[in-house]
Amino acid sequence: MKTKFIQRMMASALTVALVAAPSMSVLASGGSGGSSSKSEDKVIEIISESISDGGESSVSSIAEIPVTNTVAGTKSTVQGVYIATSVNGTAITSSLAGIAGSYGLTAGEVPYARFSNMDVKKSSLAKAVIDNAAAAIGATVGPCINIEIGKKAGGQFSLLSQEGEKISVKVGIPKSFAQDGKTYAVICVRPGGAVSVLQDTDTNPNTITFDTTGGQGAYAIVKY
């Protein structure tokens, strides 16, 4: 079980950052010895950086890597890397078959997602766009995360089109950002600077559910 988890992390953790090129991927190695150890150390280093961005302590082993693919009892329908610790869980709630069908996935291709904390220092332009968009609607910016929705085939990850059909995402609102009487939304910034404000479609005050599409983007919970 642990070995399979390590392989999944090696296959995709090196490309979880928003700034990574979509075509970049790292295949899992079934070998042992120094090469495997170095790969595991690199995975831990990258995961620790993402966790630290969310204000949490780093990890020292694969076993300590958090999994954040459940929100208010709802588990994500899509496999992937879920390490966004700055929010209270993340999940895709659209059906797996629905995503595969609407995006034209073929045999051997499966939907795959990556959720991680956004490093505002490395993504300063995206954060500036988020701040400007929030100011325009009189909103306060909360936690920011990276979301990449794609597909996996033969160990390779690639992004789905951001012009595709709607995909429903649920995110848990951290207690530190929760406030009675506020309206919540999500600001999404895509590569190139396209901005959209995504409205909350659920009635749970502890979560926010919104519709997005495939591809990558920086997402920020806001309240106003």
Image (cartoon, rainbow, N blue to C red):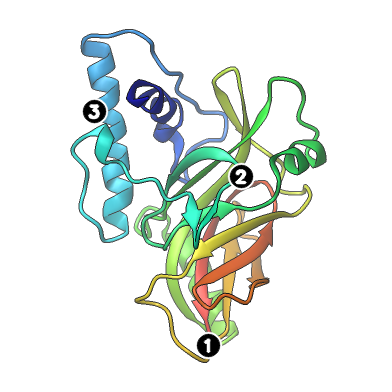
- In the picture, measured across the screen, residue 222 lies left or right of residue 60, that is right
Residue 182 shows which numbered tag? 1
x and y percent of residue 217 in the render?
57, 53
Residue displayed at 49% across by 63% down: 72
Residue displayed at 30% across by 41% down: 65
Q: CA distance from mark 2 to mark 1?
A: 29 Å
Q: CA distance from mark 1 to mark 3?
A: 42 Å
Q: Which residue is mark 3?
A: 41
Q: CA distance from mark 3 to mark 2?
A: 29 Å
- In the picture, measured across the screen, residue 4 lies left or right of residue 110, that is left
- In the picture, measured across the screen, residue 104 lies left or right of residue 1, that is right
Q: Quadrant of residue 158?
A: top right
Q: Earlier in the sequence, mark 3 or mark 2?
A: 3
Residue 77 shows which numbered tag? 2
Query: Where 163 sits versus 150, above or below?
Result: below
Local crowd size for mark 2, using a 10 Å CA cut-off: few (<14), some (14–19), many (≥20): some
Residue displayed at 40% across by 30% down: 9
Give the amino acid type for the residue marked by disc 2 in the picture.
Thr
Give the amino acid type for the residue marked by disc 3 in the picture.
Asp
For the residue pair 135 and 14, the one nearer the viewer reads as 14
